[in-house]
Image: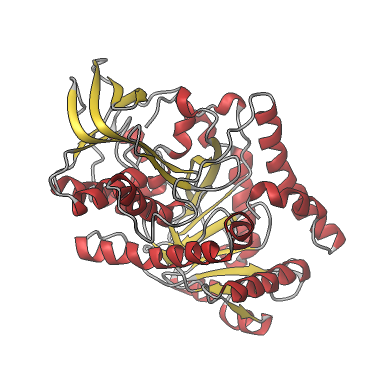
């Protein structure tokens, strides 16, 4: 990863504190998170991938499978999976930052349909690879339930169903309040049982098990992973690095260079205004007893959310905890990234309160873990997998928190672009998409934080007025809708 304002010390204790998922690997004895060897001198490879998260590892996997003779290196500032790939909500979903209607306006109907098909197919593709490669990551394809908790949210749910029918790819189901009340112990906002939209195109998994397992698989395919190796700059054909512990400097020469840093790309000058880092925070409860889960109704494999504007997301983990997260943390001046920003007590308190309000049966269950990390947002909320064959430099990211599955599609798309193959993936509207740059400060600071505040106000506005939020409508074009 790119440089952080506060470097870690590379210890197991430091890495396990990054998320419940990473801590769980150590606690269970599945992985000690010990860093792999760093790169300490100049080297030469066919492909140099910057970033040891899911984007970089899926790209390495796809390239190694397609062309086993390629010499591929992955350079990672900390350990594989230290960033968003090992901290996220564990949703392997078909979500894409830009809505289908938004993609249609920019790229046309057929392109929007193709993007939706690719995303839906990717959910099962992740499951297929994990089964084929023996990656035990608690993958269970149970779908997602999005609760509509008052009349305004029910109208939004109905609109989602209508849009999905128009594009003809997704197959969501609208569940009436009587159905939801019979299955879930979820509360409404208006004293009535919520309705819900069920989308089968989502699986629950343990993200740290996935990313750490994938790292071991790509190593078995001959890919070299260098950890505690900080990339300080890159150019066509060259990546400059520094050993975090040794201080050794060097250069990797490579015809192809892939930048796969997501929110951390903002820490390098060449990408500082290309991606904006926004923090998403999470909590995990202690394991809940079976009778509590019977009241709650969330089954293994199911993920859940609701139709509020300030996003929440959750899952029932394989060991019967809630892993629950959401937005609300502010953007920091100059696209700063710092471990101190991962723990914001007021946001953690908001998440705990939101979880108990949604599922009262949570009761006084203890919160055992609190964590967070930056995700990446492009100026037009349009994720991309792009590659310039003239310079040999590729880039993927801008997932806005929807990257757990999208990284797999990015890796396959980048592999086809790098190998100059014309495929259905390279024809997708996100392939070689170039987003505009974010504004310089102070405009970036003001705009990003007004967006976070706007989503909070939109939820309040709808509760008070009982009508769809005008604030949300104004912000919609700026947030991929």
Left-right relation of 70 to 400: left
Pick whichever, 273 or 362, lies toward us: 273
Q: How is the image coloured?
A: secondary structure
Q: Quadrant of residue 71?
A: top left
Left-right relation of 437 to 415: right
Pick whichever, 135 or 170, lies toward us: 170
Pick whichever, 150 or 115, lies toward us: 115
Which residue is depicted at the point 30% across and 25% down?
239
Which residue is depicted at the point 69% across and 28% down?
443
Q: Indicate whether 252 appears above or below 382.
A: above
Pick whichever, 165 or 3, lies toward us: 165
Confirm whether residue 386 shows in the render. yes
**Residue 419: x %, y % from top left:** 27, 47
**Residue 135: x %, y % from top left:** 24, 59
Which residue is depicted at the point 60% across and 51% down?
351
Q: Indicate whether 151 appears above or below 208.
A: below
Q: Indicate whether 14 appears above or below 215.
A: above
Left-right relation of 195 to 463: left
**Residue 253: x %, y % from top left:** 23, 26
Numbered label tally: 0
Q: Can you name the residue that lies furthest to the right here? A: 465
Confirm whether residue 208 shows in the render. no
**Residue 306: x %, y % from top left:** 63, 63
Q: Quadrant of residue 481?
A: bottom right
Quarter of the figure with the N terminus: top left
């Amino acid at each position: 990863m790119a440089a952080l304002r506060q470097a870690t010390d590379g210890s197991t204790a430091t890495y396990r504190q990054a998320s419940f998922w990473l801590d769980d690997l150590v606690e269970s004895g599945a992985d000690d998170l010990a860093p792999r060897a760093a790169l300490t001198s100049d080297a030469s490879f066919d492909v140099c991938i910057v970033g040891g998260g899911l984007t970089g590892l899926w790209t390495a996997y796809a390239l190694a499978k397609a062309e086993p003779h390629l010499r591929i290196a992955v350079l990672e500032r900390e350990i594989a999976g230290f960033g968003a790939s090992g901290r996220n909500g564990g949703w392997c979903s078909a979500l894409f930052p830009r809505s289908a209607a938004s993609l249609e306006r920019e790229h046309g109907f057929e392109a929007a349909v193709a993007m939706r098909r690719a995303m839906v197919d990717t959910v099962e593709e992740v499951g297929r690879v994990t089964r084929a490669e023996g990656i035990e990551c608690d993958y269970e394809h149970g779908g997602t339930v999005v609760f509509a908790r008052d009349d305004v949210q029910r109208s939004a749910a109905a609109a989602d169903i209508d849009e999905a029918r128009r594009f003809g790819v997704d197959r969501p189901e609208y569940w009436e309040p009587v159905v939801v009340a019979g299955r879930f112990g979820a509360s409404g906002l208006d004293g009535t049982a919520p309705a819900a939209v069920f989308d089968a195109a989502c699986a629950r998994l343990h993200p740290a098990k996935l990313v750490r397992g994938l790292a071991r698989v790509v190593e078995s395919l001959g890919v070299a992973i260098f950890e505690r190796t900080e990339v300080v700059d890159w150019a066509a054909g060259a990546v400059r690095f520094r050993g975090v512990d040794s201080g050794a400097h060097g250069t990797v020469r490579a015809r192809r260079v892939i930048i796969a840093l997501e929110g951390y790309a903002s820490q390098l000058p060449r990408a500082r205004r290309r991606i904006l880092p926004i923090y998403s925070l999470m909590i995990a409860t202690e394991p809940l007893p079976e009778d509590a889960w019977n009241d709650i109704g969330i089954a293994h494999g199911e993920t859940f959310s609701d139709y509020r504007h300030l996003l929440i997301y959750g899952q029932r983990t394989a060991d019967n905890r809630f892993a629950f997260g959401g937005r609300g943390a502010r953007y920091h001046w100059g696209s700063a990234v710092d471990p101190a920003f991962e723990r914001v007590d007021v946001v953690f308190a908001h998440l705990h309160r939101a979880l108990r309000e949604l599922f009262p049966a949570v009761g006084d269950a203890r919160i055992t873990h609190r964590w967070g990390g930056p995700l990446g947002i492009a100026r037009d909320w349009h994720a991309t997998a792009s590659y310039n064959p003239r310079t040999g430099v590729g880039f993927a990211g801008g997932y806005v928190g929807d990257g757990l599955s999208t990284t797999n599609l990015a890796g396959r798309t980048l592999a086809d672009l790098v190998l100059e193959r014309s495929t259905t993936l390279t024809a997708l509207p996100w392939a070689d998409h170039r987003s505009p740059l974010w504004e310089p400060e102070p405009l970036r600071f003001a705009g990003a934080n007004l967006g976070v505040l706007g989503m909070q106000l939109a939820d309040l506005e709808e509760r008070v007025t009982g009508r769809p939020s005008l604030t949300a409508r104004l912000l919609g074009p700026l947030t991929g809708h």
